[in-house]
Image: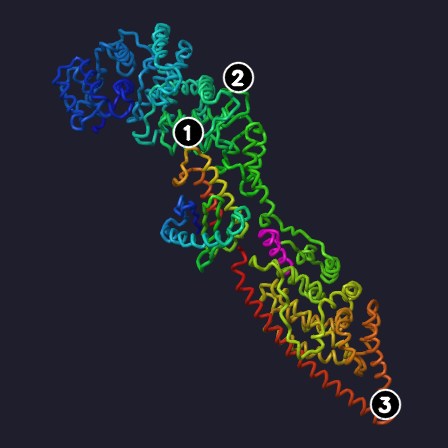
Amino acid sequence: MAQIAVIAKENYPLYIRSTPMENELKFHYMVHTSLDVVDEKISAMGKALVDQRELYLGLLYPTEDYKVYGYVTNSKVKFVMVVDSSNTALRDNEIRSMFRKLHNSYTDVMCNPFYNPGDRIQSRAFDNMVTSMMIQVC
Amino acid sequence: MEGLTLSDAEQKYYSDLFSYCDIESTKKVVVNGRVLELFRAAQLPNDVVLQIMELCGATRLGYFGRSQFYIALKLVAVAQSGFPLRVESINTVKDLPLPRFVASKNEQESRLAASYSSDSESQGSYSGVIPPPPGRGQVKKGSISHDTVQSRASAEQQESASPIVSPQQSPPTSPHTWRKHNRHSSGGNSERPLAGPGPFWSPFGEAQPGSSAGDAVWSGHSPPPPQENWVSFADTPPTSTLLTMHPASVQDQTTVRTVASATTANEIRRQSSSYDDPWKITDEQRQYYINQFKTIQPDLNGFIPGSAAKEFFTKSKLPILELSHIWELSDFDKDGALTLDEFCAAFHLVVARKNGYDLPEKLPESLMPKLIDLEDAADVGDQPGEVGYPGSPAEAPPSKSPSMPSLNQTWPELNQSSEQWETFSERSSSSQTLTQFDSNIAPADPDTAIVHPVPIRMTPSKIHMQEMELKRTGSDHTNPTSPLLVKPSDLSEENKINSAVKFASGNTVADGYSSSDSFTSDPEQIGSNVTRQRSHSGTSPDNTAPPPPPPRPQPSHSRSSSLDMNRTFAVTTGQQQAGVVAHPPAVPPRPQPSQAPGPVVHRPVDADGLITHTSTSPQQIPEQPNFADFSQFEVFAASNVNEEQDDDAEKHAEVLPVEKASDPASSLRGAKTDSKTEEKTAASAPANVSKGTTPLAPPPKPVRRRLKSEDELRPDVDEHTQKTGVLAAVLAAQPSIPRSAGKDKKAIQASIRRNKETNTVLARLNSELQQQLKDVLEERISLEVQLEQLRPFSHL
C-alpha cells in the first residue's frame, strides 16, 4: 500500500493518488494531518536561509500501520508519501529517490504552458510516473 | 435526436452546409437566418419548411443545432424527392438524393451538391455540373460531424480517392488548404496575419478549371484499394464527445487527404496499416508547419516560447487537457519551448487530434525530433524516425523526464536517452543544465550501490587497522575503516556510515568475536570510535559533539578515579602496536571455551551491535584499567578473579548483550596477557605501585605469566618496572616457599598470612569491581534506552 500526494503552497491538494483505492478518505486524512508536521519542520529549519534548508524532510511520523514521508520544494509545494510499515525493505534513500522523481515530474508538469499553477495535475506523464513508482513500492 | 444515418456524401454535404450557415463559427448552432435562406433556396413551400423545422426540433429548441440541421437537410431532401415528411422518413428513405438548393448566391453550393452527388454512393442525377474536388469546395469552415464513423470512413474514402489524383493536378491547392487550415486553427480570428479570405477564392477560381479534368478523372475513379485500409484507421474512433470535436472540415479533409496521401503511399509501399503511419509528416505538411513556425519565430533554429505556443495551439480549439497532453508529448527536451521539430510534432498531433485520432501515450517515432537540417523538408518526410531514436524513449513512459539518467536502476535505457540528449547540444543545453542537478545528489545513494564508505585517515586508524586485520580471521577489510568514518556532511552520508558501521558490527558478529577483542583492546581507539560513532549514529542534528562519557562512580575505586583517559591514550599510543602484534599468541586458552559459547548464543539476541559497541566501549576504558589492576596482583589472583569474573561474565551474558560479556572476558583475557595490560598497567601504574608489590605466590601460574611477561614487556619502561616488580615479588615468593618449607613454620605461616591478606585484598577488589560492573551495566542500559528514544528522529 502506498499513497502519494502533491499539495500546493496554500495547502490544498494538487494530486492525490493511492493504491488501494478504497482507502481514499483515510489517506486524505493522513495527508492532512501530516501537513502540520511538514509546516513544523519547515518553520524549524527555516530560520536559516531557505537555500540551506534541505528539501527532503524524511520520516514525518510513524504509526503502527504506516510511515509518512515528506518533501517540500523551494516553492513550498509539498509532496507527501505514505507507505506501509510492513514494507521494511524500503530504505530511506529509496524514498529520497522517489521524491526526486516526483519533483522532476512535477517540474515537467509546471513547464507545460497549458498547465495553470493551482490546477489539479492531470498530466498523463505524471500519472504514469506515479503508477510506476507505486508498483515499485508495493 | 433521432438516429440519423447519413451516407458519407450526405455527411460531407451537410457538414459543409452547416459550416456555411455557421457564420458565427460557433460550430454548434447555425444562424437561423442563414438556415432559412438555405431552405428558401431549396425551393420548398414555406409550410413545408416550417414543417421541416418543426420536425427537426429546431422550433422546439429554438435554434439549429448540428443534429437539427442535419435532420432538416435530410427532410429537405425527402421533401424534394417528393416523399411525405415524416420523422421516420429520415432513415427509411433509402438512396435519397441530396437536397438541392438553388443557390442564387452560391453557385458553389450547387457545385457542392453536384460534386457530392457524383459520388458513388448516391448516384444522383446531378452530374451535369462538373464538381470541383471536395477540398476545393471547403472554402467555408466546415466541420465533419462524427456521428457515424462509417460516414467518416467513407468520407475518407472519398478523400483517399482524391489524393491519388489530386496531388498531381492540384498541387497549388494544398498550400491554400493549409492556409485554410491555418485560418481554422485560428478560429477565424482575423488577427492571424496569414492569408486572408481573399486569396482563398481566387485560387479556387483559377484552379478549378485546372482540376476539373482531374476531377473528372476522379469522379470516374473507382474506390481505390487503400480504401479498405482506411477503415482500419477509422477503427480508432474519436472518443471525445461532439462538443470537443469540432475540427475544421478543411483541416479534416485536407489533412486527411494529405495524411491519406502519405499513408496510401506508404501502404502501397508497405501494405500495412501500422499505427505509426498516421503520424508521419509529409513534405507538404512539414512545409506548412515550417511556415507556421516562421510566423511565430522567424528563426528556424530558434525556439517558440511556451506562451506563444500556448496561444497558437489554443486557437485550434482543442480542450486544454488535450493541448497539455500534446505539449507533454511534443516538448521532447522539456524546456518549455518548442523547437521547429517539436513544433511540427505538436502541430501534427493537433491536426491528428482534430481529425479524430486519439492522442498516443508516447510520442510516435515519426514525430520524434530529428536533427536533420529542416531546410530540406524533403528528407524529413521520408524518414520515419529511424534517425537514431529507435523508440527507446518510447519504451519508458517516464522518459519524458530525462533528468534522471543515472539514478534509477529500473530505467537503464535512459542512459541511452542521455546519450541522445547530447546530440541536442545546440538546442537542449538548457535542458542539460536543468538535468544536472540530479547528478549532484546521485552519488549519495548508496543503497543502490555497494556501500563504499569513504575512509578518513586518523592517526589511530593505522594501528586499529592493523589490529583488526591481525585479530580478525579473514574478516572484511572494509571493516576497519568503517568505524572510523568521520564527516557527517549530509544525512545520506550519515546513513551510509550507519549502514557501513552496521556492516562492521555485523561482520564483527560474523567473525565470532575476535573483533570484539579488537574493540575492547584499544581504549583510545574505542574512545575515538565512540566519539565518532556517536556523532554519526546519533541521530538528531543536535548531536554535533560527542557527549562525554558518563561519569563513572569512582569513589570506591581510587585506582579508576586516578585514571586519566587522555593520559591513557597518550601513553598507550605507542604501545599498542607492539603489544598488538604479540597479542594473538598470548590469548590464554582457559577463558575462551567459556566465552565462545556465550557470545554465540547471545549474538542473535543482540540486533544492534553498533550500540552495544558504542555503549560498551566507554565502559571499557575505566574497566580495563581496573582489570589492569589484576596484572599487578599477579596471575594467581588474576586467575582467581578471572574465574570469578568469568562466572560473573557468564551470568551477565545471559542478561546483557554479548559484547558486554565478551568485553569483560576479553579484558580479562587482556588482563592475563600483558599486551592488553600494557596500557592499563601504565595508566594504573602510579596507583598500583602502592599496591602492586604485594607478594603473591602461586607456583604454576606465575611461572607461565612470567614467561609471557618476559616476552612481551618490551616497549614500556613503566610496565617493565611494574612487571619486574611483580616478577621480583613472584621470584621472591617462589624461592621463599621452598625455603620456608625447609626452614621452619614461621616462614610458611608468614607466607600464609601474606596470602590471606592478598586474598582479602583481592576479594575486596573483586567485590568493588563487581559493583562497578553493575553500575556500568546500568549506565549502559540507560544509554541504550536513550538511544532508542532518539532513534525515531534519526532520519531527520
Spot occupied by residue B734 in the image (x, y as percentages of width and height):
84, 83
Tag 2, which chain? B
Mark toward the start of the polypeptide (3 vs 1):
1
* Mark 3 → mark 1, Cα distance in angstroms: 112 Å
Identify the subunit bearing mark 1: B
| Residue wearing tag 3 | B740
**Magenta span: helix, strand or loop, mainly?**
helix
From mark 3 to mark 2, how far is it between C-alphas? 118 Å
Q: Position of residue B432 (x, y in %)?
A: 56, 34
Viewer-side residue, B620 vs B449 = B620
Which residue is label 1 attached to? B310
Residue B492 on the magenta segment = yes
Tell me the subunit letter for badge 3.
B
Characterize the local packing of mark 3: few (<14), some (14-19) or many (20 or more) Cα atoms within 10 angstroms.
some
Task: Name the side, left or right, on which B720 lies relative to B522.
Answer: right
- Which amino acid type corresponds to the residue marked 2 in the rendered image? Asp
Marks 3, 1: nearer the viewer: 1
Residue B259 x, y percent position in the rendering: 41, 20
Q: Which residue is mark 2?
A: B376
Q: Among all residues in the image, which is located at the extreme left?
A: B47
Q: Is residue B546 above or below residue B140?
A: below
* Nearest to N terminus: mark 1 or mark 2: 1
Range drawn in magenta: B488-505
| Element under disc 1 | helix
